Amino acid sequence: MARNAGAEYRNGGLLDYVRLPVGALDTALAEERTDVDRAALAGALRDYHRELGTLDRHVQAALEKLAHPRSRVVVTGQQAGVLTGPAYSVHKGADAALLARSLDCEDAPVVAVYWVASQDHDAAEVASTTLLDLNERLHRLTLDVPGGVPVGRVKWQDGWTAQVHALLNAFAAPAEHVQAVRERFSRAVEGGGSYADVFARLIHGLLGSAGLVVLDPMHPALARLMAPTLIRELERPLASSQAIEAAASRLEADGFVPQLRRPDGATNLFVEEHDGQRRLLRSEGAVFSTPTRTYTGEELLALLELDPTRLTPAAGLRPAVQDALLPTVAFVVGPGEIAYGAQLREVYALHGLRQPLLWPRLSVTWLEPNVARLLRRLDATAAQVQADPDGVLGRALARERAAGAVTTARLDALDADLKALTDEIGALDPTLVGAAQRTRTRTTARVAHLQRLAARALARAEDERSGQLSRLRTHLLPNGVPQERELNLLTFLLKHGEAPLRQLLALPPGWQGEIEIP
């Protein structure tokens, strides 16, 4: 059976395909990077933060470290979601800051960088977010972001500001916490600029004091530093696609489903055309094309010289572009990005780079006090509820009612009896062993299925009476999606103030689990 590449990124899975094993921090730190102009990089980031309005003492201190000749970077990044998007977008940034802090030393400083995916043009993935108030009402905010245009080109609209304030006005939470979040948001939009700029200011406001530096690859000074990597890609425009496809074949042979595919003729480059749309380039001999026009290599080089922000990497090239720009020691990534990374080792090699350490990101499920109390009563974890909410509640109710018929112990006892019976039958007539074993398997499976149905019936009946199951689903599986991937982190700041942010930044890097909010 094929294995999902995004799901099997930890134990015996896709990390076997990347250059460095998970625990190889010492190896990664020992590898020198002399090919990065750190002074130019720090200068470009200083220009960007000055224009963004975020060049505070925390950024200044981080850029001084970055300019050190032996500095390294822990980098992460995410699409520019509205109000920072799902909680894991902030969790990734926090993990980069925590890991950088743990590795930092005076003679080889380590700086955390958040790569804002301003070049991305998929509006559907960044235009909506979900928040949950104290009345357990889900608020869905959706902005009318134009598709096909890099979000770094999309001007923030006054109407979007009004939508956010309307949501905050309707959000049931302590007034002082709502006001604090409102002020965070107002600071983010006061500077104007693009959709990506507002996201970057929000991330900076949350994590800048922890040492995280935001980076927008569409800022002209930074884009200019990335141009040499794009020029190399233009010289052999299909080589990276062929490397990705070769890696996909290896993954398929080992039973995985590759996350990246590159059809014949597709490059790993996008061009932003005169209508503002970002389109994938195809290569056909000496000619490049999009659905709207053709280009020579010379024309693309001239475009890159004139405006380096208009030629941008696709997903299969973006990490290599990022890590050619930055002296990266570790790249903090989620499951899907590790699935990509498993196909990119040779893409790095094409650009004379070594793939950095891929660091599986920190993961948090937030437990508000009422949910934490309910989980303790059920003797269950949030992860168990997310996997089988009806079953968790049903089994807990069965324990309370001493309904042994649906317990694991009762099923195990039945299976033990059936095993003894099939062994006795086999001893009497060896030709019946197979049939007896199949009967045992089918019977146990059928009874287990009936137990699940009974437990879920108990859960539904209890939910109709008390709403416990609905409450668990709303908090831990909002809209049917695990909390971290659906709820915005501002949900918890709106209801509980700064405490969740302090808890997040007190974790060890790479932490995985559940945190109870006091």
Image (tube, rainbow, N blue to C red):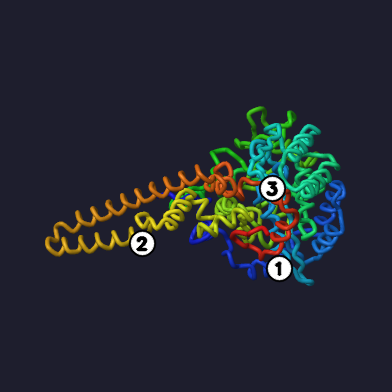
Residue indicated by mark 1 = 102
Q: Secondary structure at mark 3?
A: helix
Please identify the quadrant where the C terminus is shown.
bottom right
- Which of the 4 image quarters holds residue 284? top right
> Residue 106 location, x and y as percent?
79, 71
Q: Secondary structure at mark 2?
A: helix
Compared across the picture, whether 216 is left or right of 514 comes to: right
Tell me the crowding category of disc 2: few under 14, some 14 to 19, or many 20 or more residues within 10 angstroms, Cα based.
few
Residue indicated by mark 2 = 409
> Residue 130 location, x and y as percent?
65, 42
Residue indicated by mark 3 = 491
| Kind of residue sitting beneath label 3 | Thr
Tell me the crowding category of disc 3: few under 14, some 14 to 19, or many 20 or more residues within 10 angstroms, Cα based.
many
Q: Report the mark closest to the observer, 2 or 3.
A: 2
First along the sequence among labels 1 and 3: 1
First along the sequence among labels 2 and 3: 2
